[in-house]
Image (cartoon, rainbow, N blue to C red):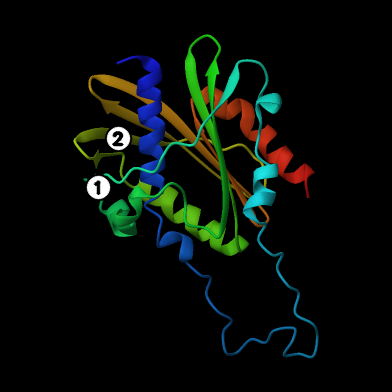
Amino acid sequence: MRRSTTTALALSAAGAVLTLTGCAGHAEPAGTSASSSTPAQRGGSMPSAPAPLSSAQLSHRLLTESDLGEGYTRKPEAPRRNDDVAVIGCLALEKLGSDSATGASLDFRRKAKASFTYTGSSSSEVSEELYSDNAAKLSKGISKVFDAMLSCPSYQVASGSTVVDMGTEKSTAPDLGDEQWSHLLTFSAGGQRSVVKQTAIRTGNILVLISGSPGLVDAHVGEALSKVRSAE
């Protein structure tokens, strides 16, 4: 198996694992206690949270080949697979709902995605996903996923006849945005091993998720956040 094929498998598996958030994306913050009062109840006006951006607005904030530089080619969106996906050996991920693992992205209200191949010294990949929803919902949903994955240093993901050995290790997230999450995922299948880094940054009601070769993720996560903010 060529390295580029192995990397593609790793990214595909990473997306499958992260989509175990069907229920996590719908978590709502706790309501106001009976003993407290809201501004509206005190006679003032209730400040409204910014409305989620549309998918079209998010698409305009995605990185492009011109943003990334020479050597990057955008990949066409892969068709959705219908293989059954199962998590083996990680109860926390199983509890998030393995039936959701066949999806293509996290279950937030608005989303946009782009994936690129980098043909520099070797074939590598990087993908960007943007989500928009209530800020508390984004925070709770992505925290639940990262916490679940980090609770299992090793487990397996089975998709069809393919079984991928997974390893998860916490990584230092850049001090960007309002909240940050980052980890390294190690994939082993067919005698090949690949490492994917995933870094998530929340800024207001937008979540930026960058996945791919660790060096490419580190190189472009700040740029991705800057483009999201410059369009505000």
Any part of residue 150 in sight? no
Mark closer to the chain start, 2 or 1 = 1
Q: Identify which amino acid the numbered label 2 is placed on.
A: Met
Q: Residues within 10 Å of mark 2 (few under 14, many from 20)?
A: many
Mark 2, secondary structure of its residue: strand
Q: Identify which amino acid the numbered label 1 is placed on.
A: Asp
Please give the name of the residue rendered at 57% of the width and 89% of the height, measured from the top-left corner: 34
Q: Which x, y percent locates residue 177?
A: 67, 46
Q: Which x, y percent locates residue 229?
A: 75, 45
Q: Residues within 10 Å of mark 1 (few under 14, many from 20)?
A: some
Q: Which x, y percent locates residue 28?
A: 51, 70
Using the rendered view, name the quadrant where residue 32 is placed: bottom right
Please give the name of the residue rendered at 38% of the width and 35% of the height, measured from the top-left corner: 12
Is the residue 34 above or below the residue 224 in the image? below
Query: Which residue has dot 1 on it?
Result: 84
Is the residue 126 above or below the residue 105 in the image? above
Q: Is residue 174 left or right of residue 79?
A: right
* Residue 166 tag number: 2
Q: Nearer the viewer, residue 76 or 112?
A: 76
Is the residue 29 above or below the residue 110 in the image? below
* Front disc: 2 or 1: 1
Where the N terminus falls, by quadrant?
top left
Mark 1, secondary structure of its residue: loop
Q: Which x, y percent locates residue 61?
A: 69, 42
